Image (cartoon, rainbow, N blue to C red):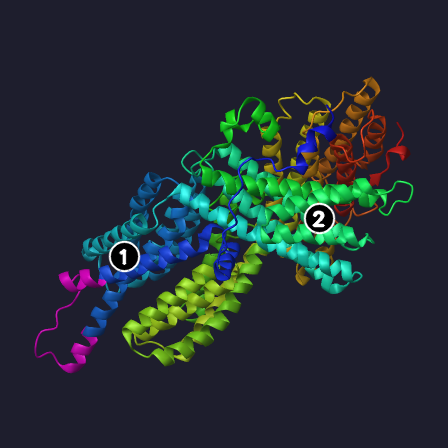
Amino acid sequence: MTAHSVRSESDTHPYDEPPPPPQRRAGWLDWLDATDPGQLRLRMASEIVLAIGVVLAAEWLFVRATGALQVAIPPGTPAATAAELWMLNHALMVIAMMLGAILAMIGGFGIGMFGAARAQLLLLLYLPLPMLGMLAVGLSVHVRIVSLALLAVVLAVGTYCRRFGPPGFMGGMLGFMGAFLGFFIQDYVSLSDFGWLVAEVLIGTVGVIAVHFAFFRPRPEAAVRRMQRSFAARARALAREVAELYEATSRSEESEANRRQEQRLQRHLLRLNEAALLIDAQLSAAAVPAGWSAAVLHQRLFDAEVALGNVARFAHALGGRPLPRRLCAQLKAALAGVHEGDLPAVFDGAAAIRRMLEDCDPRRPEVTQEDRVLLHRFATSVTDLGTALRAFRLYPVSQRPDDALSGDALLEHAPLDHLGVAEFRPQVLTFGGWLPGSAAVAGAASQERGGNGVIERIRMAPYARIAIQMGIAVGGAIIAGDALSGRRFYWAVIAAFITFMGANTAGEQLRKSVFRVAGTVVGVIAGSVLAHLVGDRVWLQIVVVLVSLFLGLYLFRINYTFMTIGITVMVSQLYVELDEFSNSLLLLRLAETAVGAGVAILTVLLVLPLHIGRVARVAARQQLEALADLADRCLDRLADPASAAGSDLELRAAARRADVAYQALVATVRPMRTPLFGRLAEPVAGFLATAVAARHYASNLLLDSSTRYADLDARGADGLAAARRQLAESVGAVTAALAPVPGPRVGGAGVGGAPVGGAPVGGAEAGGECPHGGRYVRSASLFARVAAALPGEPLTSRPQLALRDAQLLDGALAEAARWAGIPVTDLDTVPR
């Protein structure tokens, strides 16, 4: 049986039951799902704001009912004294509310790090302990210089506690907040009143638990369904972008507008992949919707994503080619069907393209051989996408699990799907519900040797590195902020503290410092305007506080500037409530923030810096290693279709590992793609572009190598083994060049040890000699020889396409090696 005959079912609808029509959703709901995967940001912001609102009300009622920490005002007290006592009581009321609100905010951030309800409950019960412990210590120390030093030490120790995972991370933050608040309220509260503070913190804990489990308790299946809606919304946005890009490229030559549209297309593909990975990370027995298994849902999701990505790539490639009008019309019809979710139009358009290709006169070809391959692959991708969409629509309605198919029916409907009986193990790990970004890569880079400098050669655990940096930065911010204002220095401390939260490299920390200062500037203006408009109307103040906080929390993953604006507006209202507001006070806050950010910037540049180039080198190496592993498994499948290492489940797992590595690479180098990095931005963009292409070719190699075909003769088998070996050796040479260098590097060092002349991730300058002595040797010609030896396989058969994929993958990896500064040599020019 040949691949051509195996794929003959592509022209037919693969299921007997007609799928239900797609459900139309309001445009704003689609936008919400596409911009906020699984509504993670919306739910987090809503939960924190609702919890803070409930806790504020509970603390107010508690203080009013019990008189906690309140000072009695006897009748006949002079007016001036009574006013002072009233202000004291008001401040004590605000302190009680702040204790609960801080716990609610930090608890809301940390609750997403645990998926099970029991683990979430244990976390919320644990959080008050470090806060109360350090609150008592802060109240006990009354020597100012000792208290200030204690803040830096507590923060450094708390940061080091990240080694214990999420509980250590959250506990360290709350321990610092406890010491911080203890220092500031010791003028109002004595240690003898600690029992009231314990009660107020516990009330906040109860409020957070009540809100979370009443409105936001974990429902794994619902979470997966929300993420599926986001995946579908992003897929529709991508389909729309593909149709528009095809129209644009078919009407005109290459233009700046077309290039920008192509960049948007790549962003859509990246976001679609992010949604797919987030779904994969959540798949478990409890999370899978009825009618599915985790393995089958993973497979259908993978198939849909790869097919849609291929539709986008091949449509873009065909856009500028001189094709016959009737073929262009069918291309547009198929793309319209994909955009509208019209499955009959999708299948009919793909079948029409195939028929036209078969009807073309070989003596007077209207379509070149290259265009024929592209059209065939476009039609196949459209059909694969339609099949995946049909499965998604069919099963949740009929409640028929995919593994209900068996025997001949299984082979007929899903010849490559052995997942119904296999155990699915997610390859994706998340942090707080999100992909970890550069965290894991930065952790690996921190424990590797860096460049030439003594500091760069220091290897240590990431939590130890950040603990030292944060302790020094906060200590410097205390000194500088205290010199500027002994009463308001804490804004400098907070600015330095925030710089290290969620930022893993020097580049990310610099960006966050800049964003904080920029957000404070805007927030000062907005806060001043709102403070004058709202005045002392308490309930309106609360509304402004909650709304500004909600918007800051909802938008902070888009840009941290929004979070800073929201916090600054909230603080402005707090100052109004404490009768301390003035425009000069807001300007002082801006100055303190700038001082704290400046100290943090100096610290990340001078104290154990983890330069972004150093981390990018590790990210690039991990990406290439993941692609090499995937390619090797696919080629093993080509050589031996019964290989366990090349099973469908293992191949998809390897593909997901490559996707995770790519997402980490993008997150790592994002700060480098700015004018601040000058000419390094171009090599970074070039390396990313080749990494994108390599991922697509590797994914297609996975699909095209998964079909049984006629056995190779001994010569062909030996040729495939030699090509596979050469590809592995070449990628190994590149990854070895990106590994830590034990001695001095060739050439001047730029950011993170990357050569100034070009390589964004280490290695040698383009065209030079690699310091490791390695080089990338092309293997495409070896794969071409194997393709020529295939007995009777047409050029559009799966085996031929798989070998073509291998050649294209070799070309993309060679280009990536050039961008990384690794010399590239053709096979024919290498002495054998």
In the image, residue 473 above or below residue 366: below
Question: For the residue marked with disc 1, what is the amino acid?
Answer: Leu
Question: Magenta segment, which residues?
Answer: 60-85
The secondary element bearing badge 1 is classed as: helix
**Rendered residue at 50%/46% (across/down):** 228
User: Does the magenta portion include 114?
Assistant: no
Residue nearer the viewer, 745 or 117: 117
Write down the quadrant of residue 789 in the picture: top right
Specify whether 128 is left or right of 162. Answer: left
Residue 666: image location, x then y, percent: 62, 49
Residue 749: image location, x then y, percent: 72, 51
Specify whether 568 is left or right of 272. Answer: left
Image quarter hosting the N terminus: top right
Name the disc covering residue 139, or none: 1
How far, Cα to Cα, is label 1 from label 2?
A: 63 Å
Residue 712: image location, x then y, percent: 79, 21
Packing grade of label 2 (10 A; few <14, some 14-19, many >=20) is some
Residue 276: image location, x then y, percent: 55, 44
Q: For mark 2, what is the residue?
A: 313
User: Does the magenta portion include 68?
Assistant: yes
Q: Earlier in the sequence, mark 1 or mark 2?
A: 1
Of badges 1 and 2, the one in the foreground is 2
Packing grade of label 1 (10 A; few <14, some 14-19, many >=20) is many
In the image, residue 673 above or below residue 735: below
